[in-house]
Image: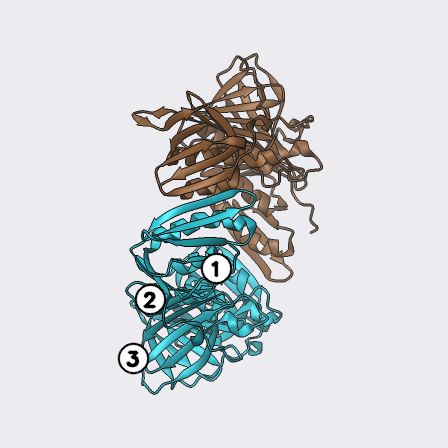
Chain colours: A brown, B cyan
């Protein structure tokens, strides 16, 4: 293998695939990035076995010659060092040449670096995926759906299935559900697929979705999502992102969500979030994060919290609407803040079915997003 | 004590004094900020016994009424919580009222917070300082001098005196020296004082100077520096910063610096720093940070490094000047990078008196700054 490549393009590709490099891998070859040079261009691959990312640098981009290819071939180079040295090289064009026993020479300006490469034949193959089940989503919508749900996955590895986000496709709708034992986040969207397409057990690690989110383009391009037996492949421009589907059956969460409410209120999202954020400062000192909400006759709520060390806080908040029974309810303020942060709506609707029942939050104008948190059982 | 104060001014004062709050203090009262309300304004004090910072909020600022005072008094409030809650309060003006047993009520908008305050009588008094020995420095010059020296102090607590920067005043000159066992940084400046003023053993903790640096204003105002027996007081607009002088005698470092060179070169600072930065990437893999410099006949140097794991790097660098014997010398690339970073000059002069002797770096046009690093003894 011998070629030159523009530093900027190589840097970008390394940046994308590096997100699949794990510092904790026990498989030596996976600490490296596989580089393959063909007549079409340069392909970089990295993997931690759960996630694999491939980035492609074409020979030409518009009028610009990006890659000058002198000899095809491939090599695996140590990811961390390769990423750092390429970023710091002094010239715009970098020469890479692989010699005997994968000894690789990188030249740029007057710099010459010899790296001991590894045999690309030892690098695991990427999964072969049949491209017959495809859904297509705009990049920004997919980013929003990930942001609105993935924070609610469980971080407890004893129930691995709950560390993932469940994707359901049915009746032309795609739904994300994330849930630990204290809260649930769900977001639904209509998609343009065969209404017969039906999936119930695609569960993708929340951490993986957060990594994907960093790579997904901000601008509104369409992403092809290929669903296979135990893999999902996200196809972006010049990037392929493979992820494993988690093993196990996701629990049925639909029964957790009440169909009618005993009390309902509508409140300004930012005012509520700011108020709970202040109450949180005291509640976290006792490590409980307990904040209490008390509904008043005059269409207001009182937010309060206390700390045995520091003192207490109370404040009043005017509501937009209040209907039903006046409740007192306590909850984890950190979970409430997480949910409020992703509402993307000036006003939210909160529904209650009693002081010991789930609290349901929705944007006032959008029934496709729902956040549930369980209240705390407190005395008095 | 009862008053209202503008949130913006209170926030700023808390931000300044908080730099003296240590999370590791074992003295409970020092986890708090002391607040004193007098007819002149509000004084905030924080201390970790090594550093004490006082910030003053005057009753009025120009046309603006900053503090409305209803009753004088004082209290100590928990620093971390007080800082966070004030920043998050919903209104521009905040009311603070201290009741019985230092119970403090903070009101802003509809928020009401009760904090358990502590008795200000228990708060340690600040040192009384005679203001007869004063030097005056522009803020930006003092910041530069700190930046150019404090990184070179020792982090080894077994020789506490070397964790400080030595200040020498003699013959109308102020000199900073910082030194661990492998490198030395020194910066000198002429100051407008009585030429009879003479100090040799003012040693101030490097960490303290870095904290001071964060508070020193960017704009070029004059700072009064009051020198007392075991304290130095820095007087800024509305802020007093007290620091302890370290106990012990600073070693005589003047003999470390050679008076003539066997070899000398002048090189572009950024080109050399970039080249050593690349070489550092390999050298740090073996945890040695060893980089080698070899002088060539053709007024160039070769920078090289290697790692048993990764491979090796060599590059050539054109010099501006080269004089004397052609040397090969090895050094800690991290120390060299630290020194190059503070040169503030396009070209630097480097002097050598042999492969095992100190390397001396100076900006080409400024003899007031000097950086010394000891070479590594390597074979071959």
Q: Position of residue B186 (x, y in %)?
A: 40, 70
Q: Earlier in the sequence, mark 2 or mark 3?
A: 2
Q: Residue at x 47, y 67 (%)?
A: B17
Q: In this orientation, does residue B99 appear? A: yes
Q: Residue at x 42, y 41 (%)?
A: A112
Q: Earlier in the sequence, mark 3 or mark 1?
A: 1
Residue B84 vs residue A374, the one in the foreground: B84
Secondary structure under tag 1 reads: helix
Dot 1: few (<14), some (14–19), or many (≥20) neighbours within 10 Å? some
**Disc number placed over residue B192 in the picture, else none:** 3
Residue at the disc numbered 1: B86
Secondary structure under tag 2 reads: helix
Q: Chain of mark 1?
A: B
Residue A55 vs residue B64, the one in the foreground: A55
Residue A373 vs residue B187, the one in the foreground: B187
Q: Residue at x 58, y 56 (%)?
A: A282
Discs 3, 1 touching: Cβ within 8 Å: no
Report, in whole angstroms, how far the alpha carbon at label 2 lies from the one at label 3: 16 Å
Q: In this orientation, does residue B38 appear? A: no
Residue at the disc numbered 2: B140
Q: Earlier in the sequence, mark 2 or mark 1?
A: 1
Report, in whole angstroms, how far the alpha carbon at label 2 lies from the one at label 1: 30 Å
Dot 3: few (<14), some (14–19), or many (≥20) neighbours within 10 Å? few
- In the image, which is nearer the foreground, mark 2 or mark 1? 2
Secondary structure under tag 3 reads: loop
Classify residue B325 as left or right of residue A355: left
Q: Position of residue A123 (x, y in %)?
A: 58, 28
Q: Position of residue B3 (x, y in %)?
A: 45, 69
Q: Position of residue A96 (x, y in %)?
A: 43, 33
């Amino acid at each position: 293998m011998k070629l030159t490549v523009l530093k900027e393009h190589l840097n970008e590709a390394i940046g994308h695939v590096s997100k699949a490099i794990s510092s904790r891998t026990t498989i030596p070859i996976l600490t490296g990035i596989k580089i393959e040079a063909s007549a079409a261009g340069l392909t970089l691959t990295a993997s931690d076995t759960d996630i694999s990312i491939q980035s492609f640098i074409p020979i030409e981009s518009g009028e610009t010659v990006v890659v000058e290819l002198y000899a095809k071939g491939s090599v695996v180079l140590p990811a961390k060092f390769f990423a750092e040295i390429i970023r710091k090289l002094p010239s715009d064009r970098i020469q890479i040449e692989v010699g005997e026993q994968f000894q690789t020479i990188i030249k740029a300006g007057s710099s010459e670096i010899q790296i001991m490469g590894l045999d690309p034949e030892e690098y695991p193959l990427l999964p072969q995926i049949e491209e017959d089940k495809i859904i297509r989503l705009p990049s920004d919508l997919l980013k929003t759906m990930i942001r609105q749900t993935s924070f609610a996955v469980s971080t407890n590895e004893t129930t691995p299935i709950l560390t993932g986000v469940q994707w359901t496709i049915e009746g032309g709708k795609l739904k994300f559900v994330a849930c630990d034992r204290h809260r649930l986040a769900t977001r639904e969207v209509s998609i343009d697929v065969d209404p017969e397409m039906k999936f119930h057990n695609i569960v993708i690690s929340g951490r993986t979705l957060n990594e994907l989110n960093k790579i997904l383009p901000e601008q509104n391009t369409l992403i092809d999502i290929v669903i296979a037996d135990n893999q999902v492949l996200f196809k972006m421009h010049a990037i392929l992102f493979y992820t494993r589907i988690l093993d196990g059956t996701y629990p049925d969460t639909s029964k957790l969500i009440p169909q009618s409410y005993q009390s309902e209120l509508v409140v300004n999202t930012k005012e509520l979030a700011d108020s709970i954020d202040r109450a949180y400062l005291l509640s976290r000192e006792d490590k409980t994060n307990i904040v209490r909400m008390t509904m008043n006759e005059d269409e207001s709520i009182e937010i309060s919290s206390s700390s045995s060390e520091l003192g207490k806080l109370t404040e009043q908040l005017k509501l937009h609407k209040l209907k039903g029974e006046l409740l007192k309810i306590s909850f984890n303020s950190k979970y409430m803040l997480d949910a409020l942060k992703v509402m993307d709506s000036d006003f939210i609707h909160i529904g209650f079915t009693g002081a010991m029942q789930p609290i349901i939050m929705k944007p006032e104008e959008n029934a496709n997003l729902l956040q549930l948190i369980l209240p705390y059982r407190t005395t008095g």
